[in-house]
Image: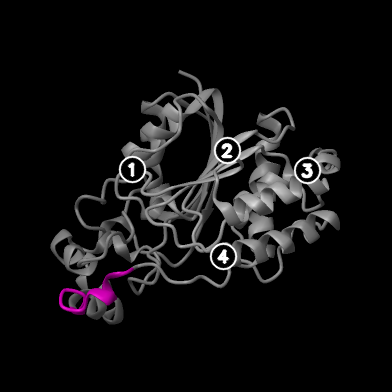
């Protein structure tokens, strides 16, 4: 255990948050998440990796955990060929104006058949090919039709739910029928979910038999500690202080925790890619509850998985 790993600034913010409620938030406007190029890249990278498992078809009814400040990734999936998108979050941090600007920029990227962007973006999982996906190009005749674009734009403004729905908080009563979704995805989100068991259970409940999930999960400390994997060294009492009154932080689950949870609800792992990071601490330095995690998990900074709902 190494309590000295904790950075002073986030610890001070946590302590101050007990008396200053405005400091308890963990939501910050992410300039990258509201860039159309970023949303376009995330959507096409997931769809590119998913394609061999979906017969090179864009899944029709889809949902995303944690869209963040804008619905760009979901809108990009609609422009690629999805027919309905549900955003799942703790709170709705988006606004119609930002989403409309994102929509217009994404339409321009699709019309130009722009190759998948990689410059200036934080990318761990690469697509199968950086070129504009051919299986998506064949859809553009109808996905970019004037009438459909008008309907998407109107739904962004009216929030009617015909093409785009927002469910927050997703842990409560949501308007998603069991077995109604074809694909659920997330990107650098699942590390913030306290109850991953419920998340994977609900994902299986909402997916049709044979439905797919794809998740990119960031296992780093998010600068809470001096070392990228130092969050696993922090003893539980100090971690509770660091969490403070925040509604969520990072959950400190390992990659194996997610794999075990998915398997327990009938997901069959189809693809797994790990990005290992040098310079981390050894498991011998971890707090006792994390010291027995697989050695490879202790070195895994980011992982990408695709799984199918089979049982």
- The image position of residue 134, as x and y in percent, is 84, 42
Upstream in sequence: badge 2 or badge 1: 2
Residue 158 seen in render: yes
Upstream in sequence: badge 2 or badge 4: 4
Of tags 3 and 4, which is closer to the observer? 3
The answer for how far apart the CA atoms under marks 1 and 3 are is 32 Å
Name the image quarter holding the C terminus.
top left
In the rendered image, the residue lying farthest to the left is 237
Query: Which residue lies under the disc numbered 2?
Result: 62
**Residue visible at 29% across and 81% down in the picture:** 9
Upstream in sequence: badge 3 or badge 4: 4
Residue 33 got which mark? 4
How crowded is the residue under tag 2: few (<14 C-alpha within 10 Å), some, or many (20+)? many
Of tags 2 and 3, which is closer to the observer? 3
Residue 171 got which mark? 1
The one nearer the camera, 274 or 267, is 267
């Amino acid at each position: 255990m190494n309590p000295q790993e904790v950075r002073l600034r986030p610890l001070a913010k946590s302590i101050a948050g007990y008396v200053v409620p405005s400091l308890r938030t963990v939501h910050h406007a992410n300039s990258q998440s509201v860039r159309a190029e970023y949303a376009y890249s995330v959507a096409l990278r997931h769809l590119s990796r998913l394609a061999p498992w979906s017969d090179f078809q864009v899944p029709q009814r889809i949902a995303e955990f944690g869209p963040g400040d804008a619905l760009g990734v979901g809108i990009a999936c609609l422009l690629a060929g999805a027919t309905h998108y549900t955003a799942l979050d703790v709170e709705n941090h988006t606004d119609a104006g930002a989403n409309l600007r994102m929509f217009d920029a994404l339409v321009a990227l699709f019309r130009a058949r722009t190759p998948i962007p990689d410059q200036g973006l934080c990318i761990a999982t690469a697509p199968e090919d950086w070129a504009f996906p051919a299986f998506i190009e064949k859809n553009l005749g109808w996905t970019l039709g004037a009438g459909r674009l008008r309907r998407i734009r109107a739904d962004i403004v009216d929030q009617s739910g015909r093409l785009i729905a927002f469910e927050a908080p997703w842990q409560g009563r949501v308007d998603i029928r069991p077995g109604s979704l074809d694909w659920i995805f997330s990107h650098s989100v699942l590390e913030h979910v306290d109850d991953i068991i419920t998340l994977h259970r609900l994902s299986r409940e909402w997916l049709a038999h044979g439905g797919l999930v794809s998740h990119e999960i960031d296992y780093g400390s998010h600068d809470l500690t001096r070392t990228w994997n130092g969050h696993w060294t922090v003893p539980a009492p100090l971690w509770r202080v660091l969490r403070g009154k925040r509604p969520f932080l990072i959950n400190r689950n390992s990659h194996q925790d997610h794999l075990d949870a998915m398997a327990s609800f009938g997901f069959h792992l189809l693809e797994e890619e790990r990005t290992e990071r040098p310079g981390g601490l050894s498991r011998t330095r971890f707090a006792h509850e994390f010291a027995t995690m697989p050695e490879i998990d202790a070195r895994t900074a980011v992982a990408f998985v695709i799984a199918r709902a089979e049982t």
